[in-house]
Amino acid sequence: MKVDLFDFDLPPERIALRPAVPRDSARLLGVTPQALADHVMTDLPSLLQPGDVLVFNDTRVIPAQLEGMRGQARIGATLHKREGPRRWRAFIRNARKLREGEAIDFGADARAIASDRAADGSFALDFLGDEPVELLLDRVGRMPLPPYIAAKRPTDAQDADDYQTMFAREKGAVAAPTAALHFTPGLLTALAAAGIAHTMLTLHVGAGTFLPVKATDTIDHAMHAEWGRISPETAAVLNQTRARGGRIIAVGTTSLRLIESATQDDGVIMPFEGDTAIFITPGYRFKGIDGLITNFHLPKSTLFMLVSALMGLEVMQAAYAHAIESGYRFYSYGDSSLLLP
């Protein structure tokens, strides 16, 4: 399909620079093939059914934005995907000043050797020393806000909390699974009282999620890979939910993509551990999920293609036009939607 089919105009003032306070006061657009309905997140228990299960991503965002020096040249690095105990794949700013084999000094005894430059311009960074890389990043890294926020304001201490979900546990993401930012302990309690359960998986979101689609046709786009895990226990919960007639509602496109990667053609969800580069566009047959809670995505992005595959392109075009007209807030810190095909 032509990538231009997934374009739309978004007024800059619709881009949220801070999350809603409290988190569960964010707006929620209900979308079905038949209708659109305006809600808030606290309405969610009444919009789902007893027996449904929500699937959250428990990844934790690491301070993956680094600033350093290679000699007299200033180098920026955004860690993208872990490739070993001390090796990370990173997108490099001012990459023309960096060659394979050269060291970047990030300060505070954090240094890395650049190697293995890839076609996308990224480098492998091997961190020197014996200290766990996580401790180095805690000292010298910053929270990696999405570029459409970082271009409008600097990262600050508030983002360290704002950009983590209440489920964040497994360190390794360089972007938050933002649909879950709207959930609070009180909302979870209300969902449980309504007979709606939840379970966890892990998908370490990579910086590639923000890369623009440069191809003119979706068939020519190379999707980035991300590491994920669905435990045997979670797979069993999901299969049991389906067996008794409940619905699987993915919270976020990260949860959805991993579930679909782990689901067989007969609808059985298998345990999973490894990389997934699944790219979902219209025409895809969904096997593992029955609905999706997700924020509003960028024009011509792989995520807008995904929601268009789930609901139909015309339905999502109408939903986004309504959201823009009605003042919904977009992107990572913005409002949410409940998509029920």
Image (cartoon, rainbow, N blue to C red):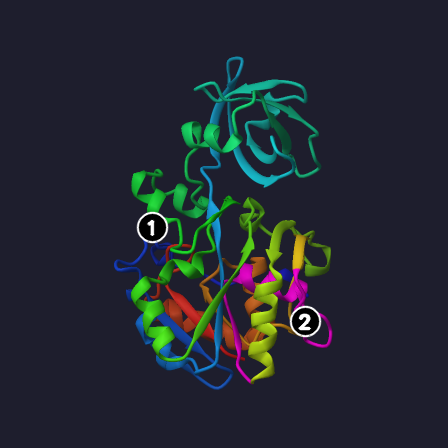
The residue at which mark 1 appears reads as 17
Q: Is 325 rendered above or below residue 148?
A: below
The answer to which of 154 and 193 lies nearer the viewer is 193
Q: Secondary structure at mark 2?
A: loop
Amino acid type, callout 2: Tyr
Q: Which residues are magenta?
A: 245-271
Q: Quadrant of the N terminus?
A: bottom right
Residue 281 drawn at (x, y percent): 64, 66
Which residue is found at the position 55% from the left and 55% from the top? 202
Q: Is residue 276 visible?
A: no
Total numbered labels: 2
- Considering every residue shown, the one lying at the far front of the view is 233
Q: In x, y percent, where is residue 136?
A: 47, 28
In the image, 336 versus 264, the foreground residue is 264
Q: Residue at x 47, y 18 (%)?
A: 109
Within-10-Å neighbours for mark 2: few <14, some 14–19, many 20+ = few
Q: Is residue 223 magenta?
A: no
| 260 drawn magenta | yes
**Looking at the image, residue 230 lies above or below residue 44:** above
Q: Which mark is residue 284?
A: 2
Please, is residue 166 above or below residue 116 in the view? below
Quadrant of res 183:
bottom left
- Horizontal and vertical percent position of residue 341: 54, 80
What residue is drawn where x is 56% and y is 20%?
A: 129
Q: Mark 2 vs mark 1: which is more N-terminal?
A: 1
Q: Quadrant location of residue 142?
A: top left
Residue 13: give x, y in percent of width and height: 33, 56
| 149 to 92, vertically: above or below | below
The amino acid sitting under disc 1 is: Leu
